[in-house]
Amino acid sequence: MSTASEAEPGRLVYTAEEILSGGAYAEPLIANEVRCHGGFTQDGDYRSPRMLHRGPGIDAWKEQLARDGHELIDVPPSITPPQYPNTAQAKLLLRNGVQEPVVRALTIISIVEGFGAMIRDVRVPKLDALFVENIGGTALVHLRGALFEAHARDESGYREEGGHKQMWEAARDEALENPKIPGDVLMRIMGRRRNREKTGPVFPEIDPKLERMLGFMAQVMVIEIMAEGTFEWGIDILSDPEVSASPKSAGEMVAFIQQDEKPHVEYLRTALSEARARTIKTVDGKEIAGKVVVDEFMHRILEAMTATRQREQREDVRGTLVDAMKVARNPKSLLEEFDSLDQAWTPPESTGFISTRTPSAA
Ligand SMILES: [Fe+2]
Ligand SMILES: [Fe+2]
């Protein structure tokens, strides 16, 4: 007999309450005295939050997509530029008592995680009226109030439970022993967001809410995939006893966050692939292939992010690097050594997605 709390592999339809439920844990996750989401099994294994039904649901929607003969979109990890400062550079700074650039990088990550809460505010149009084909039993119909809400809670915490924002802060503060947090981090991020160009709709013929939703999902998915490199970086630095005061728990904390991110990438690529496999009704009664729309967004976002991400990270760090190095014994030779550890990186030649709309006249 099945009960509401039991996962049923292959099931395609869930209530929002089910998607948001995590089941019981033998022990909670406490990060720097903050109760966080997820928890541990009797054997001490970490279990991500809200995965009792969300995990099997995502698997089932992916299997359905494959059964119907449709592709699951993918982004190769080679699209991600290396983190700046890179692992060797960050460790060099920390060994020389220069914490600020690493603290800044970790604080940016925690703030951006907190911004993940915005995904619950994405307006979801009446999707069944906008696609020609049926969307019953897909990830798409579970976005509103369920998959988006679970994602928002994972990133920024929910009620008294901390999420990734608090988990990164805890890892940072444990590993670097409650460092001084630069006061301008949030202001700089916000300033850059304001300066981003606003562009008009790419597909004026489709429902504007649908365009915004698909564009936002593609953007978040690319950010999530690029974050993979950040996790490897964070684990490597924060679990190195030479530079981390809390190598075990700080390194593990980042690994828990990394585990929690898997369903984010997976539900987004599944839902985008479902939209891509369908036909979208236009506002003037015609039709457009979902593939044309989704691939256009994926292409544009990948192209823009591979071009800007590395530059923006460098600007963030370089702007205060020389000042931060003043606390070192020999700042000049430290800067030289730091720069000698730099890694060249060129983005891959193709995004892997085909753009059919020329960007509006530059
Ligand atoms: Fe996250
Ligand atoms: Fe995420």
Image (cartoon, rainbow, N blue to C red):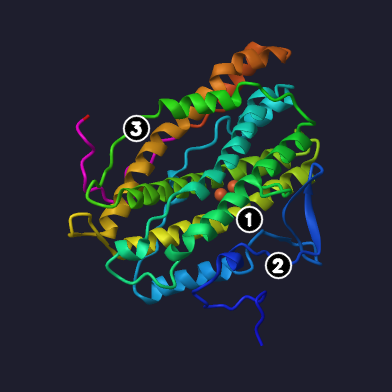
Q: Check mark 3 vs ligand 2: CB closer than 8 Å? yes or no.
A: no
Q: Position of residue 59 (x, y in %)?
A: 52, 70
Q: Which residues are magenta?
A: 344-361
Residue that mark 3 sits on: 198
Residue type beneath disc 3: Lys
- Would residue 343 appear left or right of 158 to someone viewing this image? left
Whether the magenta-drawn stretch holds residue 51 is answered as no
Label 1 belongs to which residue?
259
Question: Which of the pair 314/212 is nearer the observer?
Answer: 212
Residue 141 at x, y percent in the picture: 44, 65
39 with respect to 309 (left or right): right
**Foreground of the two, 20 or 40:** 20
Which residue shows up at 28% across the image and 42% down it? 201
The residue at which mark 2 appears reads as 23
Front position among marks 1 and 3: 3
Q: Spatial distance from mark 1 to mark 2, Cα to Cα?
A: 17 Å
Tags 1 and 2 touching, CB below 8 Å: no
Image quadrant in which you'd find residue 285: bottom left
Question: Between disc 1 and disc 2, whose residue precedes?
Answer: 2
Q: Quadrant of residue 175?
A: top right
Q: Is residue 313 above or below residue 113?
A: above
On the rendered image, what quadrant is the C terminus found in? top left
- Dividing the picture into quadrants, the one containing residue 172 is top right
